[in-house]
Image (cartoon, grey):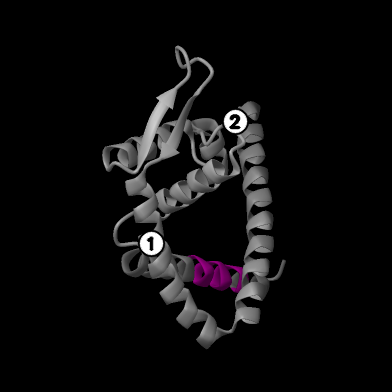
């Protein structure tokens, strides 16, 4: 790989990192004032699971952790906060060995609807200015990029593991 190619990779990766930082910082601050993005996604997922009635309206912590791609410890901490805020009820069957689950409360539904209204207003204006087709294309490209980035992250982990085994 030439020095020019390496310089381009550095410049592009720096710009991508910077843009993700700016987007995440501004987006959280201005659009998610009452809850974090993972908390919103969790409430949304719990509400959808409840509506689907697959597990009698229950969302098991393991499923939530998988959906959010978070560890069980991180998920438990977040659910604990949602419970303390009165947005979910955290329960278990029997002695809890089969797993714990959450259900959304009326207060959680109200918070979810409130956040959805903020998002509708915000994204309504974004769609108008950026264009729905542009946004769909961008999301498709972001999904492709995320797939490649995840694959490369897995390769990095394998390389680090292999290097550690050589020592």
- Observer-side mark, 2 or 1, equals 1
Q: What type of secondary structure mainly makes up the magenta span?
A: helix
- What residue did someone put label 1 on? 115
Q: In which quarter of the image is residue 77?
A: top left
Q: Which residue lies furthest to the bottom in this view?
A: 129
- Please give the range of residues in magenta: 8-17
Residues marked 2 and 1 touching at CB (< 8 Å): no
Was residue 9 drawn as part of the magenta stretch in this picture?
Answer: yes
Q: Report how far apart the C-alphas of labels 2 and 1 lie in the structure.
A: 46 Å
Residue at image x 50%, y 40%?
Answer: 70
What residue is pinned by disc 2?
164
Question: In the image, is 64 to the left or to the right of 35?
Answer: right
Q: Residue furthest top?
A: 95
> Eyeballing the image, is 133 above or below 161?
below
**In the image shown, does 31 or 88 lie closer to the viewer?**
88
Disc 2 crowd rating (10 Å Cα; few below 14, some 14-19, many 20+) is few
Residue 69 visible (yes or no) = no
Q: How many labels does the image show?
A: 2
Image spot of residue 130 (x, y percent): 55, 84
Residue occupying the point 39% across, 30% down: 90
Whichever of labels 2 and 1 marks the residue nearer the N terminus, that label is 1
Q: What element carries label 2?
A: helix
- Vertical order, 124 against 56 (above or below): below
Residue 145: image location, x then y, percent: 65, 62
* Residue located at (72% from left, 66% from top): 1
Give residue 157's position: percent from left, percent from top. Answer: 61, 40
């Amino acid at each position: 790989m030439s020095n020019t190619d390496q310089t381009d990779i550095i410049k592009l990766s720096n710009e991508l990192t910077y843009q993700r930082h700016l987007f995440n910082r501004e987006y959280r601050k201005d659009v998610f004032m009452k809850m974090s993005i993972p908390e919103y996604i969790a409430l949304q997922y719990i509400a959808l699971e409840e509506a689907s009635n697959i597990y009698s309206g229950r969302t098991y912590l393991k499923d939530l952790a998988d959906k959010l791609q978070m560890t069980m410890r991180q998920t438990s901490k977040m659910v604990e906060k949602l419970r303390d805020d009165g947005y979910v009820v955290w329960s278990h069957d029997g002695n809890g060995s089969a797993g714990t689950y959450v259900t959304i409360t009326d207060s959680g539904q109200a918070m979810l609807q409130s956040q959805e209204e903020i998002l509708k207003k915000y994204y309504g204006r974004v769609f108008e200015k950026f264009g729905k087709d542009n946004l769909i294309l961008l999301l498709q490209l972001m999904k492709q990029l995320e797939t490649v980035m995840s694959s490369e992250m897995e390769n990095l982990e394998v390389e680090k593991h292999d290097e550690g085994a050589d020592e």
